Amino acid sequence: MNFDFELILFYAAIITGIIALFDYLFLARKRDKNDKLPIIIDYARSFFPVLVIVFLLRSFLYEPFRIPTGSLEPTLLPGDFVLVNKYDYGFRLPVIHKRLFGDDTKPARGDIMVFRWPPNPSVNFIKRVIGLPGDKISYINKELFVNGTKIPQEYLQDATTHDGSGDEWQATEKTENLLGVNHHIYINANRQSRDFRDLEVPKGMYFVMGDNRDDSEDSRFWGFVPDANIVGKAVLVWLSWDSDHGWLNKLRWNRMGKKIN
C-alpha cells in the first residue's frame, strides 16, 4: 500500500491548525490559567507549528527520498537516503503540484530526477534524465545514442550486484560520458538488449533510464515523464543503510555526504 506522505502531512497541519485556532477564539478565554489543557488541544497547539515548518521545508526546499531498488546502481544503492532539491526545476504548489514560477528552470540531461511515476502518480520513481524535449534517442545493442551521437562507454571493471528478487548476478561496470556528464553504469551481457531507434521525446516530456541498464523499469518500458510529474533533483546522499549486513555494519559511512552525479 502506498501512502501520500505529503497529503497526510498537509491534512495533519490543517486539522491541528483548526483545533488550535478554535481553542484560541472560543475556549481559551473561558479557561482559568491553572486549568489543564484537554489533551487534544495540547497536542494540536504543540504539533501545529512543527507540522507547518516540516510541510513548507519539504514542499519548497528539500525532501528526503529513500532509494528502494538497485535500478540506479552503481551511482545510488538500495538503502541510500537522498536529499531532493525542490526548487531547481521551479517552485510548485504542494498537493496539487502546479508550477508557480520558474518556467525557465528545467531538468538537464544527466540529472538524477525524482518524479511521480506516470502509470501511478501516487508512487515516486527516481531515474537519470537521458532525453530532453525534442531529442531523438536510440538504444542499440546496449549503447546509447542522443540526436545521432553515440554516447561513449569505457570498460571499468567486473562487479557483482543483485536484482529486485535478491538474486546475485555479474555485471560489467562502465563509465559513460552523456554529452559532458560522466557517470558509471552496469551492463548485464547475459540479458537481451531492449533496442529502439530514433524515439523522439515530445514537448513537455522527458526520457529517463536507470544506470543499472539491464535491471531498471524506465522509459523504455512505460514511456515518457511529463513535466507536471516532476518532483525534484536528487543532489546528496545524507544517509546510507545496508540491510544485508549485521547491525554494526548497516551504516555505509563512506557514502554519507556524497554528492550525486
Image (tube, rainbow, N blue to C red):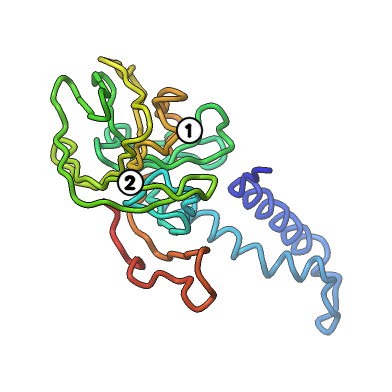
In the picture shown, does residue 112 fall above or below 64?
above
Secondary structure found at label 1: loop
Residue in the picture at 35% in, 42% down: 212
Residue in the picture at 28% in, 59% down: 259
Q: Report whether 242 appears left or right of 16.
A: left
Secondary structure found at label 2: strand
Q: Residues within 10 Å of mark 1 (few under 14, many from 20)?
A: few
Which percent across, then down, holds residue 190?
36, 35
Q: Residues within 10 Å of mark 2 (few under 14, many from 20)?
A: many
Closer to the camera: disc 2 or disc 1?
A: 2
Q: Report whether 156 appears left or right of 127.
A: left
Q: Which residue is mark 1?
A: 98
Q: Which residue is mark 2?
A: 171
In the picture shown, does residue 191 fall above or below 91?
above
In the picture shown, does residue 230 fall above or below 24?
above
238 or 85, which lies in front?
238
